[in-house]
Amino acid sequence: MKPTQILLADDHHIILDGLKVVLSNNDNMQVAGMVTNGNEVLEFARKYPIDLVVLDINMPELDGISCARILKKELPHIKIIILTMYPQKSFVNEIVKIGIDGCLLKNNTGKELITAIKRVMGGQAYFDHLKAFSDDKDEVIRFKLTPREIEIIKAISNGLKSEEIAEQLFISPHTVLTHRKNILKKLGVNNTNQLIKYATKQQII
């Protein structure tokens, strides 16, 4: 039986190395490659035959959500497991809509990743720890932001202009500008620099 070909994507090399060590102990799984941003994920997936991507949610150039959305549109046969540090149920609802196959908190990787991969490759979803995720009300109280607004903040933090964000998220530039205005108003900040500082402090990015 051919080993499951897995692409690892995270902008921290220490995380990539750790995940590779975990997977290398399983004969049925093989790390086909390791990349550090969403654009590299797409380039690799388009070029090489892979079965599954373990995808960090917060990466430069192209974030995990946007990358997953494109992957599911272009290469729907590829399974996707998202890694996140942000345990919010509305975030999970967002990735389920996209068609992502599983989600793990970064502090739960290791043996659980092996379990998640086996289940996902068997045609099932893996969202086993939703009880550990904050509910939508808690998230609204903490961030006052929707998942889409958080997504746009991350794109802004990566230096993308409104037109680029619109193209990346498949929405209009006007919609992006509206989101930007709403974000500044909700968070009580006046400009992009203040927004990024706030988002960094609150661990949104």
Image (spheres, rainbow, N blue to C red):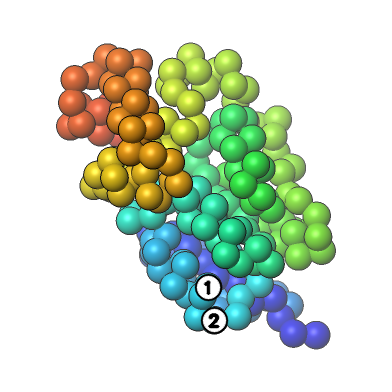
Q: Is residue 53 above or below residue 3?
A: above
Residue drawn 33% across the image and 56% down it: 61
- Residue 205 visible in rendering: no
Task: Out of 130 and 177, give the one closest to the viewer.
Answer: 177
Residue 14 placement (x, y as % from top left): 41, 62
Type of amino acid under label 2: Tyr
Q: Is residue 118 left or right of residue 197?
A: right
- Residue at x 33%, y 33% (from the top left corner): 174
Query: Is residue 110 toward the left or the right of residue 34 in the image?
Result: right
Residue closer to the observer: 72 or 143: 72
Pointers 2 and 1 in contact (CB under 8 A)? yes
Q: Quadrant of the C terminus?
A: top left
Residue 187's place in the image compared with 50, above or below, is above
Location of residue 6 by image quarter: bottom right
Q: Would you call the spot at circle 2 few (<14 residues within 10 Å), some (14-19), or many (20 or more)?
A: few
SS at circle 2? loop
Judged left or right of residue 18, residue 194 is left
Tag 1's secondary structure? Answer: helix
Residue 139 can be seen, yes or no: yes
According to the picture, the residue beneath numbered tag 2 turns out to be: 48
For the residue pair 61 and 132, the one nearer the viewer reads as: 61
Instruction: Residue 56 in the image: state x and y as whole percent.
Output: 49, 53
Examine the rendered structure and indicate whether residue 1 appears above or below residue 119. Answer: below
Image location of residue 31, percent across then percent down: 57, 76
**How many numbered marks have been drawn onto this rendered protein structure?**
2
Label disc, if present, on residue 45 of the rendered structure: 1
How packed mark 1 is, by other alpha carbons closer than 10 Å (few <14, some 14-19, many 20 or more), is many
Q: CA distance from mark 2 to mark 1?
A: 6 Å
Give the numbered dot on residue 138.
none
